[in-house]
Image: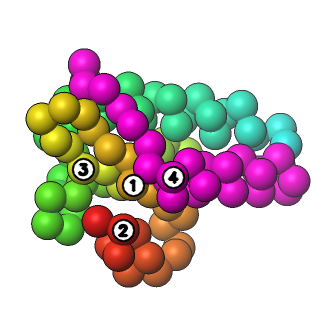
Amino acid sequence: MARLLFTTAARADLADAVRWYDTHAPHVVRQFRDALRAALIRVADNPKQFPLAYKDTRCALLRRFPYILVFRETQDAVYVVAVFHTSRDPLTWISRT
């Protein structure tokens, strides 16, 4: 299992998403966190199972939520560079890679 590390921007994305759900749909915060955890486990188990999205960056969809994990794999770890709502402009996360 690969080591997962979040960039500062990805941590901010995650905090924003949780804050939004906590404000607008508090009953699904736990489900969102569970979906995120499941996606992170899948990424850590086998990052290459996810398609390349841009150069060496891959994306994993969260189940039941309109979010993707954008990540890059190195020899040492998998770096999550964005927790990104799918309706946002992908140029935002592409600029982080």
Magenta part of the chain: 1-24
Q: Are marks 2 and 3 in contact (CB under 8 Å)?
A: no
Image quadrant holding the C terminus, namely: bottom left
Mark 2 or mark 1, which has the lower sequence index? Answer: 1
User: Does the magenta portion include 86?
Assistant: no
| Residue that label 2 marks | 96
Characterize the local packing of mark 1: few (<14), some (14-19) or many (20 or more) Cα atoms within 10 angstroms. many
User: Which residue sits at x=36%, y=32%?
Assistant: 4
The CA distance from mark 1 to mark 4 is 8 Å
Determine the secondary structure under disc 4. helix
Image quadrant holding the N terminus, namely: top left
Which kind of residue does numbered mark 3 sit on?
Answer: Arg
**Which color scheme did the rendering employ for the protein?**
rainbow
The CA distance from mark 3 to mark 1 is 7 Å
The CA distance from mark 2 to mark 3 is 11 Å
| Residue that label 1 marks | 81
